[in-house]
Amino acid sequence: MCGIVAYVDCDSCQLVPITEAQLDASLHSILHRGPDSNGRYIDPSNRVGLGHTRLSIIDLDGGQQPISNKTNTIHIIVNGEFYDFERIREELIAAGHTFKTSSDSEIALHLYEEYGYSFLEHLRGEFALCLWDTKRSIFLAARDRFGIKPLYYANKDGRLYIASEIKAFPPLGLKMAWDIDSIVQGGPITDMRTPFAGISKIPPGHYITTTLSGTFRVERYWDADYPDKRVKDPRSIEEMIEGVRSRLVEAVRQRLRSDVPVGIYLSGGVDSSCIAGIATKILREKDPSAQIRAFTISFPEGNHLDEGPVAERTAEFCDAIFDKLEITDELVAEAFSDAIWHFEMPVANLNGVSKFLLSKFVRDAGYKVVLTGEGSDEHFAGYKFFEPDYLLEPDLAASFPTLSEKDRADLLNYHESNAQLKAYGSLAGKVEIDDSPIPKRMLNGIVTPQLIGKFLYVNKEVYTDSALQRTGVPDPSLAIASGLSGEARRKIAHNWHPLHSALYCENKTILPNGLCNFLGDRGEMAHSIEARTPFLDHFLTEYVNGLPPKTGELVEKWILREAVKPYITEELYLRTKHPFFAPAARNNYSPVSELFRQKLTKESCEALGWLKWEGVADIMSQYFETGDQVIHNSLLVLTSYVILGEKFQVPTYTTFCNTAL
Ligand SMILES: Nc1ncnc2c1ncn2[C@@H]1O[C@H](COP(=O)(O)OP(=O)(O)OP(=O)(O)O)[C@@H](O)[C@H]1O
Ligand SMILES: NC(=O)CC[C@H](N)C(=O)O
């Protein structure tokens, strides 16, 4: 993948123009995203700049960026991969377009010439891009449908700043400040906010445009949709299984197109294992002795979380080359600060740090591109916590037998009488928040947002009174419900089955902000690794979203298991989901506990300006007494914020509210 940086000074901008040296410094800050080459375009007016740092994957010698059109009036920078680009390129050439490179990135430029803003509909894959059309004075920046590639913006004092990573902004002169509302309400995970004031993510499936006059728009070009819950689907199960299989195979085939070798991140689960099986089969169509190289994380000190042995058996089944990275507590604690600098958001577990280490391992092995299984659970309802929402209403769409109404009522009752959500593999069920009833009313009674909202939750006792006076008490599920579009909320209220509504919420929050971010691009790109996610192919997801809720029911991902049965071992066909979880701090003297002691001091907490030291000290001592996992996770979040404050040199937060009191 690559790194991109851009800026636009509108007519009202009174700021000193950004210099070439500043643009270079900004690119330098994200050099890990593209160590192979870099380039820039600065408009003769000095008001628009585009910078690109490249990890070359397709057209290794010729694909340098920015790329311009034949008349040098449109300039583009792209991070990402466009699949099936050769077919589109041929069509564009036949329509009279002249290509300057053989890079997949260039198709976006010509598609824009051909279709205007509708060019985005023709792109398949993961991407973030910026385009400057000098003739129309239009600047456009867009992000892929799922948020696989990051793209941030800030619109301040008449200047629009855009970059793949937040750390590229300070060299352009943007000042960093805490966004206390976002922090308290979990904005980095619940919506498009970041921990930093005025800096937002471009929402997945959206583009932003600005003219030099300063007309700024954020528009959606794609969204997930689900069928009307009252309409029966006439398809047979067999047809649906075949529909999933053929689209997944095609999604993997497209993602094997590369001018450098492609490996795989292989776990002990069905998602990455079926991709390994499918990829091997496809590679062997051309070369019967082809072997894919598989990379696996193993946790030797936390045996019950170790997926190494299952992955090894899968690798044997696929005849893959198998590499295992053993991750220890010491390695995780050592890498934590650096990982947070790359994630640019807090984390509540150590999974991302482990994957961050895996990416380094893969890069050291000489690989630039891997396949991964992210995005499957968000479409096939792979998490057990979706169950109460599945049970909330009958499935009227399925034309084959579903639960009887009595069974549904009994099971739902079981969930309700358990009071706390049955979030297996997660501690969310133990986190107690006084959720307001409003988000449930807004979202047809589903409970998934409450669960997601707890991900970055920290007990309100740790915040200063003035911070809480300003933000109100934490209510992250309200932030989630409010972050959805009005149109989506209307469909949730009237059209979609509650399971589909729950999947939609997961797809708008945890998927782009967690899985694709600190568990995806950010840890991978820290080590110049491009990861490709076949489960996030929009032709596949649109098909899966159109299936009746029953296909996501109770036995996890059963339709996927049936579809990929020919490509996986019997062991995996029968195995239930084991979510990826890195072991937490094991005791008071483990390296991660030491990290808490080192980072969470009175001085460091007070330097943030919104943490109350007494509250933090209190939960720390509770943790050291009890080893409570929920507190452990909160301490990880707070430690992350201290690290972000140090690395980004964020000034201590003060409120007007505070001084006025
Ligand atoms: N231990 C691991 N080693 C290497 N890669 C991993 C590991 N755990 C997860 N991954 C990567 O992250 C992806 C997402 O993990 P996740 O646990 O959601 O899926 P899975 O393990 O493949 O399948 P399942 O959801 O059925 O458990 C995996 O598909 C895999 O590419
Ligand atoms: N690393 C990237 O984002 C890849 C950009 C483009 N596909 C290339 O191969 O150069």
Image (cartoon, rainbow, N blue to C red):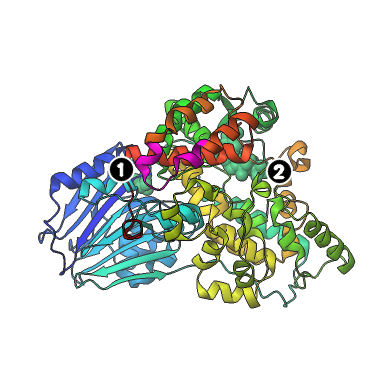
Contact between marks 1 and 2 (CB within 8 A): the answer is: no
What is the x, y in percent for residue 551? 74, 60
Q: Is mark 1 within 8 Å of ligand 2?
A: yes
Is residue 480 at all visible to an observer of this figure? yes
**Which type of secondary structure does the marked residue at label 2 adopt?**
loop
The disc, 1 or 2, on the residue closer to the chain's N-terminal end is: 1
User: How packed is label 2: few (under 14 Cα within 10 Å), some, or many (20 or more)?
Assistant: some
What is the x, y in percent for residue 655? 34, 56
399 and 417: which is toward the camera = 417
Amino acid carrying mark 1 in the image:
Arg
Res. 54 mark = 1
397 and 595: which is toward the camera = 595
**Which type of secondary structure does the marked residue at label 1 adopt?**
strand
Tell me where the magenta segment starts and ends, as one range. 604-617
What separation in Å lies between label 1 and label 2 (alpha carbons)? Answer: 37 Å
On screen, residue 395 versus residue 366, left or right, reads right
Is residue 281 at all visible to an observer of this figure? no
Q: Which residue is farthest front?
A: 661
User: How packed is label 1: few (under 14 Cα within 10 Å), some, or many (20 or more)?
Assistant: many
450 and 552: which is toward the camera = 450
Secondary structure mostly seen in magenta is helix
Res. 577 mark = 2
Residue at figure coordinates x 78%, y 59% from the top left: 416
What is the x, y in percent for residue 606? 38, 40
Residue 375 covered by magenta stretch: no
Res. 273 mark = none
Amino acid carrying mark 2 in the image:
Lys
Q: Is mark 2 within 8 Å of ligand 1?
A: yes
